[in-house]
Amino acid sequence: MKYPNIIAIDGPAASGKTTIANQLAEKWGYLFFDTGVMYRAVTWLALHKNILTKDEALVTDLADRIKIDVAPPSKDDGREYDVIADGIDVTWKIRKNKVDSQVSRVSAYPGVRKALTKQQRRIGLVGKVIMVGRDIGTVVLPEADLKIYLDASVEERANRRYKQRVDRGEDVELRKVLKKLKKRDNIDSTREVAPLRAAEDAVLINTDDLSIAEVVSKIENIALSMMKE
Ligand code: DC
């Protein structure tokens, strides 16, 4: 008996994917991989190099060359892992507002997706992995053994994101967080290549009224029932 080998967790921004996948991966001894950090790292690098994110050709070129490493946390500053882009620690830099507001545009570029999807598949196919994103079950790892689609109302997700930011000491307004989330949802789900959507064989979980622990245990139960089949 063993847990499903490759697990895909998709869903909109702030649906709880990262926290939940991270906890499951720790419990099971699996690799947790958050593909959003790759799109964020490319966006950060473009901004860092003063490349306009509307310049699709230059941004795509960056995505082709960038070296992104995700490693165990090297500092005790609330991070769950280190994100290193071309040798620079960008763990917190990729969470800044500027990246948030540009990342959906960058992740809609087909060439960027092609480059990053290739790297993600390579990592995912090694197995014993929980991979998180928008298109993992549909495009990156359609062969995943278990696909979960996490959802929550945009208001609930805005509340969660707002609290995270306040806890980090940032000066934010709930109204603005909500507006930005709606904008990102729209771009992520209407783009032509690999839009945000649940795979046909995904298990849908609405997390509006569920705690993190409840969602984790729901997924564990699904995995256990698969082991009995
Ligand atoms: O999950 P996140 O908020 O860190 O993701 C940042 C952006 O990256 C998100 O707006 C959409 C994009 N993304 C994507 O298009 N495909 C993925 N597999 C993961 C993220």
Image (tube, helix red, strand yellow):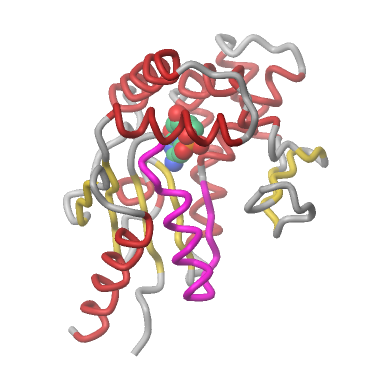
**Residue at image point 24% right, 70% down:** 222
Label count reads: 0
- Relative to 206, residue 72 above or below: below
Query: Can the viewer see residue 209?
Result: yes
Q: Is residue 32 magenta?
A: yes
Quadrant assignment for the C terminus: bottom left
- Relative to 199, residue 71 above or below: below
- Relative to 85, residue 5 above or below: below
- Relative to 123, residue 220 above or below: below
In the image shown, does 109 or 189 lie closer to the viewer? Answer: 189
Q: Does the magenta stretch include residue 187?
A: no
Q: Quadrant of residue 67?
A: top right
Expressed as whole percent of the image width and height from the top left, the position of residue 177 reads 44, 20
* Horizontal arrangement in the rendering, residue 205 relative to residue 23 (left or right): left
Expressed as whole percent of the image width and height from the top left, the position of residue 125 reads 48, 64
Q: Give the residue furthest to the bottom.
A: 1
Q: Give the residue furthest to the right.
A: 87
In the image shown, does 24 or 33 lie closer to the viewer? Answer: 24
Query: Can the viewer see residue 113?
Result: no
**Residue at image point 48% right, 33% down:** 163
Q: Quadrant of residue 174?
A: top left
**Residue at image point 63% right, 30% down:** 42
Q: Give the range drawn in magenta.
A: 14-34
**Residue at image point 55% right, 33% down:** 39
* Horizontal arrangement in the rendering, residue 75 relative to residue 53 (left or right): right
* Horizontal arrangement in the rendering, residue 227 relative to residue 141 (left or right): left
